[in-house]
Amino acid sequence: QEGSAVLRRLLAEECVSGAASACLLLQLSYMYWFTAGLKSGAMWSDGTASYYALHLDGFATAFAVWVRAILPMWMHALGTIGVWYLELLGPFLLFVPFPNPHAYARLLAVLLFVAMHSTFALTLRIGLFAFIPSAVFLGVLP
């Protein structure tokens, strides 16, 4: 009850905007839009990129080794396509212009991107890359 009251209060408050906020949103958006643009190889179009990422023994965590043994190929394809679409379209959720839908859209964007980076952290040894974008997203919470 108390948690939902805090969330309702946060979502009801007016948005803070300015040049610094716009720059932060644009920097995050550019990072994801450009990485989505770079994902043009055959592994991204046939949905096998996550399969191959989890099979890079130098990067795979123990959890990834367990997951890759049980994950069917269609789930690899779903993850690959999901990451690409999230990076391409997810940043637009940060720019929804209306106050209340804006807060929900931005919260959804933050949750989706943090979930994506948490999955990267659980399955791949990629250092701080999995955590830094999640920390930056704290600055765009409504």
Image (cartoon, rainbow, N blue to C red):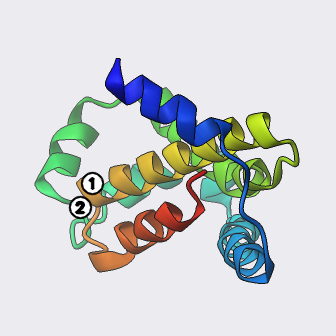
Query: Is residue 129 positioned above or below 87 on the image?
Result: below
The one nearer the camera, 114 or 94, is: 94
Query: Is residue 23 positioned above or below 49 on the image?
Result: below
Residue 32 lies in quadrant: bottom right
Q: In this view, does 118 lie to the left or right of 90?
A: left
The residue lying at 40 percent from left, 74 percent from top is: 132
The one nearer the camera, 25 or 62, is: 25
Mark 2 lies on a secondary structure that is loop
**Mark 1 sits on what residue?**
123
The one nearer the camera, 132 or 51, is: 132
Name the residue at the left extreme: 62
Residue 129 lies in quadrant: bottom left
Residue 102 placed where, x, y %?
Answer: 76, 43
Q: Give the position of the N terminus as an image quadrant.
A: top left
The residue lying at 52 percent from left, 52 percent from top is: 113
Can I make out residue 47 in this image? no
Whichever of callouts 2 and 1 sits on the residue coming sooner in the sequence is 2
Three-letter residue code for mark 2: Ala
The one nearer the camera, 28 or 87, is: 28
Residue 49 placed where, x, y %?
Answer: 52, 54
**Mark 2 sits on what residue?**
60
Name the residue at the right extreme: 97
Of badges 2 and 1, the one in the foreground is: 1
Q: How far is mark 2 from mark 1, CA to CA?
A: 6 Å
Three-letter residue code for mark 1: Thr
Q: CB of mark 2 within 8 Å of CB of mark 1?
A: yes
Residue 41 placed where, x, y %?
Answer: 68, 65
Can I make out residue 87 in this image? yes
